[in-house]
Image (tube, rainbow, N blue to C red):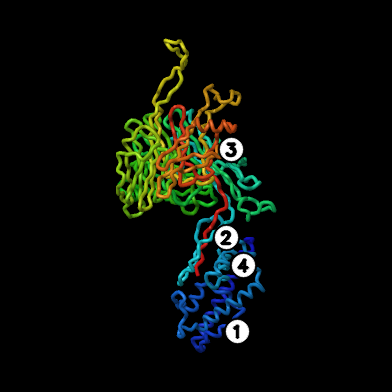
Amino acid sequence: MSAKKVSKYIRQQRRERRRAEKLREREAKQAAKTPKPQRSPRNPQRAGSKKHATAAPALTGSEQTQATGPAPRHGAGEQPSAGAQPSAAAHHSADHRHSADHQDTASHETPEPTPVLEGLAAEDSQRAPGSGTRAAAVVVGLGLIAALAGSAGFDLTRSSERAPAGLAAHSISAPAVTERIFCPAMPGQPDSITDQGMLTYAERDPSATSRIDTVMLPTGAETDPVAQWAELSQEGRGSAEDAEPGFTQQNHTEGSVLEIQPPEETPENTPEDPRARRVTLATGFTYYAESGPLAGLAAAPCTNPQRNQWFLGPEVGSGAMSLLSLANPHDRPATVEITTYDREGDRGSTGATTVLVPEQSVRSVNLAGLTTDSATAVQVHASGAPVAAALQSARTSGQEGLGVELLPAQTSALSHVMPGVLTGADDDAAQLHLYIPGDQQATVELQVFDENSQVPTEAPGVFSAEAGRVAVLDLGGLESGSYDVVVRTDVPSLAAVRSPGDGEPIITDTGVGFDPITGEALPEQSEEDPAPDFSWSASAAALSPGFGALLPRAASPEEDEAAPEGETAEGGDAVELESQLRLFAPAEEDTPAVVGVNLRLVNTYGTSTEPFTVELTPGAGLTLDAEELAERAEEAEIGEVAAVVVDHAEAPAYGTLITRSEDGRFTATALRPLTRGAQHVPLHIGQ
């Protein structure tokens, strides 16, 4: 059913509805002057005049209520009493429905019903009378969706004074629209920033690099996705370049936007085919600097523009810096309100600001001007156009960087699972940051698990949290290692964990020595403390087929094309990163004794291993280290692993990639959906 036919049908329905309203007004005036005798309920077949029968369309349930008043209600199986005879207007409305159904068939160009409409109409006709009316309401809903392309996720609910029919929600495919994915700019120190958000960066350290890795493949269709990359900065949008399918890499210093176009309509690839809209897409941004004030490792997925976003824990205060970038890749301006909340609650006007982000541009906000407490929740609300927000946080001591991170956006929920939290480095414990939106106090349950079972911490297991204020708890008393943190609240909450690292020493080979007794050659090794860094873990989503993540990879500083592969112009080795996969399944009442998760490893050519099963014990974490991932890839002869993809999970399970550099810096990225495709809109049809 084409959008043109739907629009034509909607216009015709509106015209007929206006004629019906005028007809009802005339009938009401006539009835006030000359009351008509009531008809017997035994003779309902008598139709109204031919003029009336052909002038009015079928009325929806709400229109019937407005015309005749609320219908009498009866218990189940109860028959109307003799005194509760239907009025003449009610009979007239019923006759109109009968006549209008034939009239539509004979004289109107009715769109061909889709399978969804046919199924809905068939189901509805068994539940209550007037199924043709509700089918027409669905067609009107389709027209509204076609007119509001891109606003998938809204509810179309028909208001009525009568009780709802009790229909289950039905979903239909929304029209394919252009999808925009934004990747942040390379982190840097602000040299200056204006009230309008115009930012000038200080000179970056020569070791600082950033890289964007992308995999984009069609799913279930032969047609390659049509997409383009373009740099997006505060000066505007740069020239576009085609985004090639498969695994690709970009090294943009500015922010970058990837636009994926909806498929063109062809005989082999029509928009009605949902497979043509699905795209396997994963984008990963990686930053690494070995020295300088922003030394550290940070990785994050590129994100879609949103209307409302939350962040927890920006680094502020002495030796800290947090910059919030707001990207608007749309053709209309966005007005963005930034509001902060700390341990004392809403900071009021001193902790809030409004920024205008012009179309196709980026603006920045220095959070040091809004808050002085690292225990802060930041709300970003956009109107006019959605924006992609990225929060860069760093901490320094003089000119020595102590870590940098791209903070993940938060989502309010009743349960939060954060796998793979590294802690236990000396007395520097991981910290749980918690915020309760609204005005209702929350009861919080906190659990921490290692690779064997739940473990005690110095933090309370159950406690209360005030609404509107940020709470921070140290997860002290844990040995060095990787842990899984679970937080449950009785009201929606935001939660994230700041990880200082596990403090494991860096072991390097320094040469070859000899055993003093046997004379056998032995490797000599040295141990060093890891470079300082920190990372943030937000609530992960339960794994489903199509979840996954790209393994972060760092770019080499200014590689010389004439230099041997893997060496920079200065003759040094390229930066190497190693990733391990942490998986965790919570222990619930209905969780099986063993939770199987089927995984695939994929290389940069799109070749994957056969699915292999990892068995999880509920309530205990499991780590697949970099060596095990490499061995599985070697056995499958696919070479270097570029991505991890989930095929199936038997019960709720969660996953995070923990990536480390050779000097011990680290970052964490949660597994998330990779497949983008046709969006579905729920339609709730009232009687």
Q: Is residue 241 visible?
A: no
- SS at circle 1: loop
Mark 2 lies on residue = 147
Mark 3 lies on residue = 608
Q: Quadrant of residue 508?
A: top left
- Which residue, as the protein is rendered here, is positioned at the far right? 267
Q: Amino acid at mark 2?
A: Ala
Q: Which badge, 3 or 2, is on the more N-terminal residue? A: 2
Mark 4 lies on residue = 9
In three-dimensional space, the C-alpha distance between marks 2 and 4, rounded to whole angstroms, equals 13 Å
Q: Which badge, 1 or 2, is on the more N-terminal residue? A: 1
In three-dimensional space, the C-alpha distance between marks 1 and 2, rounded to whole angstroms, equals 37 Å
Q: Which badge, 4 or 1, is on the more N-terminal residue? A: 4
Q: Amino acid at mark 3?
A: Ser
Query: In front: mark 4 or mark 3?
Result: 3
Mark 1 lies on residue = 49
Q: Amino acid at mark 1?
A: Ser
Residue at 50% x, 63% y is: 168
Query: In front: mark 4 or mark 1?
Result: 1
